[in-house]
Structure formats: structure tokens, C-alpha cells
Amino acid sequence: MNRISSTQTIEHTGLCSAVSLKDAVEIDSVILFEDSTSFIEELLKQYSVPDCQLLALSPCRAEIVMAADRADIDIVQILAEDITDTVSETDIIFLENPNRSNGSNFSLTELKSLSAKVPGGLLIIDEYYFDFLRISAASALKELNNIVVLRYFNDWAGAATKDHGYALISPSLSKNFNSQFYKSSMSRNSARICYEQFGRSRQRNNQLKKIQSRCLKLAREITDIGLKCRLTAADFLIVEVDSAKMAAELQKQNQLNIETIYNQNRLTSLLRCQMTLTEADNELIETLKLAVKTEKKVSEQKIRAGQLMKNSKAVHMN
């Protein structure tokens, strides 16, 4: 039975066809979803075995935690370098490529290596920022039979929310995937909206170029301030400030889209600066300049206070 013609409308078929052409995959490998949490839950339920675990190599967002909870699977948060000591052949690995928090990424060779560690399990790869990174496991779908690639119809595709998206799934997995799920995977209206916007590749590419140009410009200006800055294959920058306290204070700036990055539940001095409206760029630079100036002033005051105390002790001793 043909999966698409039996369970999806012409809108779904058109969108699946557009995706298969764009990503050079078979149309039967494309699965649309309107809610990422429900889709991941379905994946976990259908491809998990008793006593398997979900190994998360990326921070567990709320939807991942909820999906695992509904599927009754334990989550183990680990670092990629520690996976050999933890993984079993039937486990499910989840990762983001690139990481949504800090922009770090895995190479295609590394992804294939991770797939080989769970021959009886699954490797789920969230490629939310694929349009920026351009490194994808999709090219290995025919070679590897245990990978699922998640993509999203973000703002550029006219999606109502950032939960709308699609999965690229290995053909062997696709044959066994529960066809009943497709009937409610994405509404006809959502499929139509995403399909209409999907073809506007020039508009999407122009937006990506604009964001990348702004990131580069801001990175130069932030470096000139005296802060360390790292470009990422995404729509945000990573900025290292002088202290965790300074990072926390900057995060309180409600008008700017700044987040602190957590490492093993500890607040670090790294900031994730999201690209928002162009008008906010200058405001971000001015805010960082003021924070650096304030931090420098406080530091100088502490040095002077320390010197005065040292001189006072010397006088007292004499």
C-alpha cells in the first residue's frame, strides 16, 4: 500500500515531493509532523525495546523530556566522549547538529560512528539549523538503516510554530513505521502553508545571507570591544564575558535576546546572543560596551581598595 496516497492529501504529497527533491531523498523517506514532541514520542515507542535507554548527547529540551516520559524511556545525559562506556546496541541516541545552545557540531564521519554503536537501536539527529550548517546525515540514509533526521519548517517557511517539520527516515525504518500516525501528523492547512512558502528558496537564501552578514559584522564589533566572540553555524553568536556575574546581569536585559549557557548545571561566562531585529544590533553593542566599562570600573575599585588596605596595614605595622 502506498503510504502517501492512502493517508495524505494532495497538500501533503506536494510538500513531501518538494522536500524529497530539495534533500535528494526518496519520497517514502519523508515524514511530516506538526508537533515534534508527539513525533519523537512515536519514534521512541515504535523503535525502543525493553530496558533500552535514551542517551542524550545534547541538552534535553522540554519536548524531548516529555516524549521520553510518555514513551516510558529513561534519559541519560552524557558527553559524546563518554558514550562508549554507557551505550548498548539497542539504545537510542539523540543529538542536535549543530547544538542549539552553543553551536558545536558533529561531522558526518562522527555521525556514522555513532550510528554503528547502536545497530539494534536508533540515532535521532535534530538538524534544526541545517540551512546554516549544511552538514547532514541525510546523505547516509541508504547506507545506514537506523537513523532519523529531524528538520523544521521555521519562520522562513511560514510555519505557525517552530514545532512544524519533517523527518528523513531510513527506507527500512519507513516500511515499518506506523502508517496510522501519518493521518494526524500534520493538518492539511499547515501542509498547504508550508508548501507555498517552501518553494521560495530565493527569499530563504537571502534571509540566511542577511543573518550571516549581521553575525559577522557583530562579531567584529564585539571583538573590538575586547570580548571573545565565536561565530556559529546558526542565527546566534557565542560571546565570552569576564565573569559569570556579568553574564547573569546581561541576561536581565529584557529588550535583548541574550541567554546564558549552562554547563553541567553551573552558570558560565558564555552568552548566547540571538539575532533579532536589525534595530537591536546597535543596542546589543552598546549594552556590551557598558557592561565591559562597568566591570572594568569595579575591578579598578577593588584593586585600589586592596592597595589602600595593604598600605594601611604597612603603616600600622610601622
Image (cartoon, helix red, strand yellow):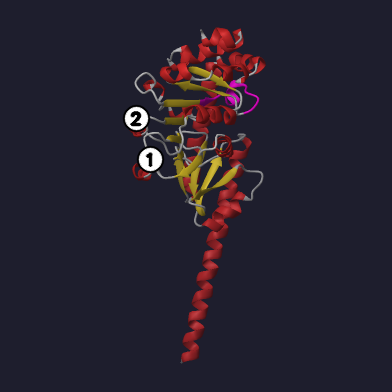
Front one among 133 and 50: 50
Front one among 30 and 274: 30
For residue 95, side relative to residue 249 (left or right): left
Q: Quadrant of residue 61?
A: top right
Q: How dense is the environment of label 1, judged by Cα within 10 Å: few (below 14), some, or many (20 and up)?
A: some
Separation of residues labelled 1 and 2 (CA atoms): 15 Å
Picture residue at 61% right of the left edge, 23% below the top? 34
The magenta region covers: 151-161
Q: Mark 1 sits on what residue?
A: 87
Q: Pinpoint residue 256: horizontal percent, then vertical percent.
A: 62, 43
Q: Can residue 218 be seen in this view?
A: no
Q: Mark 2 sits on what residue?
A: 112
Q: Where 269 falls versus 164 (above or below)?
A: below
- Identify residue type, mark 1: Val
Q: Where 238 falls versus 208 (above or below)?
A: below
- Element on which disc 2 rests: helix
Q: Which of marks 1 and 2 is in front?
A: 1
Q: Pinpoint residue 96: horizontal percent, then vertical percent.
A: 47, 35
Picture residue at 54% right of the left edge, 16% below the top? 179
Front one among 23 and 32: 32
- Identify residue type, mark 2: Lys
